[in-house]
Image (cartoon, helix red, strand yellow):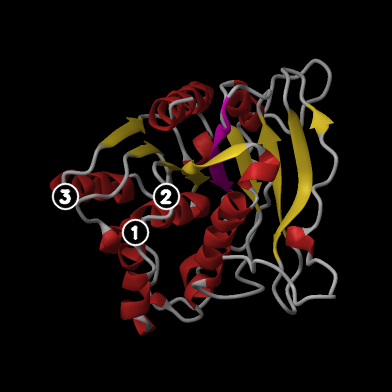
């Protein structure tokens, strides 16, 4: 969790500094862009964009969004190619704006990529983002007791681990890798490859570090009492085969954890090939978050 403050007499670290001015959103509310949430020695600023709904009579619930990109690419500014970027005149609202308009703040988070740090730095950063939201909840007007996680691909993997570690109260994960050791068998890849996404995450080929691969897999932490899950996956996914979510959902059900698993027949990774899946996934996710967070 981010430090509570500097020693007396020193300037505030960026994650404790006054918040930047917001930019109005078309449907009301505002976005605070590039807000530092953690200050780590020798590391680039870790920042998030915060989409706030219009102010209401009570603090808003919040969902932490974690981007995809195989842990080695991507940024907080994108939900993938199926959706528009920042709102421009004549375009549809972004997924973050859709969720904010439903009364839920969205904190879209950058985390260290594998070119910067290996596991578990990425999960540590995600936990720091949740900790920062709780630390600054009064300043932000959000409810520290109502925080969910949402992620796509590698970000879905991190979101699932946030939920299974008890850090958040609900999880929406799109096509997440849930069992790293099983991925080569699912994709037909070489478990000894040193340049796979998973090997770059762990710092070694999967076959060389089976215990670490298990420790970095959400399926290893499924237990009774975990928060509700929404798992969405494309049956035509060639990057993270849909069986990863099918087995993960089965493990959650076996532990009596509430899970809604939906598989879209024609959708590839990132909902490529199925605009209908992209539309439905966002609608389901928004409805799930409203229901679980009481928005």
Between 36 and 195, which is closer to the camera in this rendering? Answer: 36
Which element type, helix, strand or loop, lies under badge 1? helix
Q: Residues within 10 Å of mark 3 (few under 14, many from 20)?
A: some
Q: Position of residue 116 (x, y in %)?
A: 66, 73
In this rendering, the answer to whether 14 lies above or below 105 is below
First-in-chain label (1 vs 3): 1
In the image as oriented, which residue stretches furthest toward the front?
Answer: 8
Q: Earlier in the sequence, mark 2 or mark 1?
A: 2
Q: Residue 96 location, x and y as percent?
A: 63, 32
Magenta stretch in the rendered image? 58-66
The residue shown at (39%, 25%) is 291
Residue 70 visible within the image: no
Q: Secondary structure at mark 2?
A: loop
Q: Are marks 3 and 2 in contact (CB under 8 Å)?
A: no
Task: Please determine whether, in this image, residue 17 is positioned above or below residue 275.
Answer: below
Residue 218, label in figure: 1
Residue at x 51%, y 45% (from the top left corner): 152
Please say if the residues under marks 2 and 1 sit with CB atoms less than 8 Å apart: yes
Cα gap from disc 1 to disc 3, whole angstroms? 13 Å
Of the pair 282 and 20, the residue shown nearer to us: 20
Q: Which mark is drawn over residue 176?
A: 2
Few, some or many C-alpha atoms within 10 Å of disc 1 (few <14, some 14-19, many ≥20)?
many
Give the residue pinned by disc 3.
255
Asked if residue 65 is among those painted magenta in the image, a careful observer would answer yes
Circle 2 Cα neighbour tier, 10 Å, few/some/many (<14 / 14–19 / ≥20) = many
Sequence-first disc among 3 and 2? 2
């Amino acid at each position: 969790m981010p430090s509570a403050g500097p020693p007396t007499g020193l300037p505030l670290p960026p994650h404790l500094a006054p918040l930047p001015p917001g930019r109005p959103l078309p449907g009301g509310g505002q976005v605070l862009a590039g807000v530092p949430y953690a200050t780590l020695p020798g590391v680039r600023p870790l920042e998030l964009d915060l989409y706030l709904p219009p102010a209401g009579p009570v603090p808003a619930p919040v969902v932490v969004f974690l981007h995809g990109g195989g842990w080695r690419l991507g940024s907080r500014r994108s939900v993938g190619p199926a959706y528009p970027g920042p709102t421009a005149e004549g375009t549809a609202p972004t997924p973050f704006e859709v969720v904010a308009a439903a009364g839920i703040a969205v904190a879209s988070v950058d985390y260290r990529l594998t070119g910067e740090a290996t596991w578990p730095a990425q999960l540590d950063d995600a936990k720091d983002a949740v900790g920062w939201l709780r630390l600054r909840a009064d300043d932000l007007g959000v409810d520290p007791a109502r925080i969910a996680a949402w992620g796509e691909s590698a970000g879905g993997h991190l979101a699932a681990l946030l939920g299974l570690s008890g850090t958040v109260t609900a999880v929406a994960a799109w096509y997440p890798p849930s069992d790293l050791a099983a991925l080569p068998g699912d994709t037909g890849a070489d478990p000894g490859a040193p340049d796979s996404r998973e090997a770059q995450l762990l710092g070694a080929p999967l076959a060389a570090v089976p215990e670490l691969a298990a420790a970095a897999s959400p399926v290893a932490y499924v237990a009774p009492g975990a928060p509700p899950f929404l798992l969405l996956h494309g049956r035509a996914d060639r990057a993270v085969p849909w069986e990863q979510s099918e087995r993960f959902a089965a493990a959650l059900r076996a532990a009596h954890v509430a899970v809604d698993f939906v598989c879209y027949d024609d959708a590839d990774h990132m909902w490529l090939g199925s605009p209908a899946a992209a539309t439905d996934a966002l609608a389901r996710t928004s409805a799930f978050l409203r229901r679980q967070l009481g928005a």
